[in-house]
């Protein structure tokens, strides 16, 4: 398979998009783009500040603009925010401009990855553990239809290096269907 020009990593917060994205970009000799960092550069505000001062709707609009600003970039691996694919036409835009890869993790795994550092996550910073788990389950249910549209689904639970290798391996194989599902 010919390498796509843009690879969009999608999945819930804590699924490993940033870590895998950096490894994958290095492995493919692509540029790595963190969509949240791009939003911060464009707005001159941190993500927590955007949420605190302007709210989630404003953030989602900025996220969509940051995503579309990637149109003329080539050979990039993009780590998107967890809600990015479920907002507006973002998933359709990503599918039209590159390959989407869903890093799938069980809710319990996500909880154990994000709860200890919840203060860095504006949507859950104010929640206790029970509420964090309920938030994960509720928002995953809403986002799964978008996530499931991905061209490729990879188990995001193993070590980042293994996840990266699974993605690279699938990129080197001929496509046999419109969606591949890689699970270990």
Image (cartoon, rainbow, N blue to C red):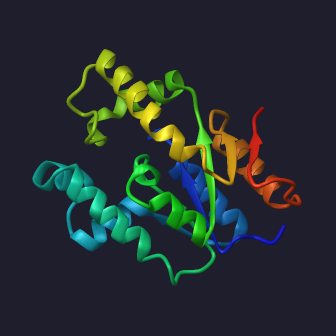
Residue occupying image coordinates x 63% and y 53%: 101
Task: Indicate whether 149 appears above or below 12.
Answer: below
x and y percentages locating residue 182 in the rendered image:
76, 41
Task: Indicate whether 64 appears above or below 10.
Answer: below
Residue lying at the far top of the rendered structure: 130
Residue occupying image coordinates x 28% and y 73%: 42
Residue 171 falls in image quadrant: bottom right
Task: Indicate whether 120 appears above or below 140.
Answer: below
Residue 2 falls in image quadrant: bottom right
> Horizontal placement of 4 versus 42: left or right?
right
Residue occupying image coordinates x 50% and y 25%: 107
Residue occupying image coordinates x 34% and y 62%: 63
x and y percentages locating residue 61 in the rendered image:
28, 63
- The C terminus lies in which quarter of the figure? top right
x and y percentages locating residue 66 in the rendered image:
37, 70
Instruction: Tally the numbered discs.
Output: 0
Residue lying at the far bottom of the rendered structure: 72
x and y percentages locating residue 125 in the rendered image:
24, 34
Front residue of 38 and 161:
38
């Amino acid at each position: 398979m010919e390498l796509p020009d843009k690879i969009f990593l999608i999945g819930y917060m804590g699924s490993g998009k940033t870590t895998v994205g950096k490894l994958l970009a290095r492995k493919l000799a692509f540029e790595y783009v963190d969509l949240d960092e791009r939003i911060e550069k464009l707005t001159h505000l941190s993500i927590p500040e955007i949420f605190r001062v302007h709210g989630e709707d404003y953030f989602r609009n900025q996220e969509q603009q940051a995503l579309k600003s990637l149109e003329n970039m080539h050979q990039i691996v993009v780590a998107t925010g967890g809600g990015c694919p479920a907002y507006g036409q973002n998933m359709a835009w990503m599918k039209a401009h590159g390959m989407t890869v869903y890093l799938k993790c069980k809710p319990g795994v996500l909880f154990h990855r994000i709860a200890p550092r919840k203060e860095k996550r504006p949507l859950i910073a104010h929640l206790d553990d029970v509420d964090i788990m309920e938030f994960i389950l509720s928002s995953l249910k809403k986002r799964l239809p978008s996530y499931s549209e991905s061209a490729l689904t990879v188990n995001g639970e193993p070590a980042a290096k293994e996840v990266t290798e699974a993605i690279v391996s699938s990129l080197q194989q001929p496509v046999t269907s419109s969606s591949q599902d890689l699970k270990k």
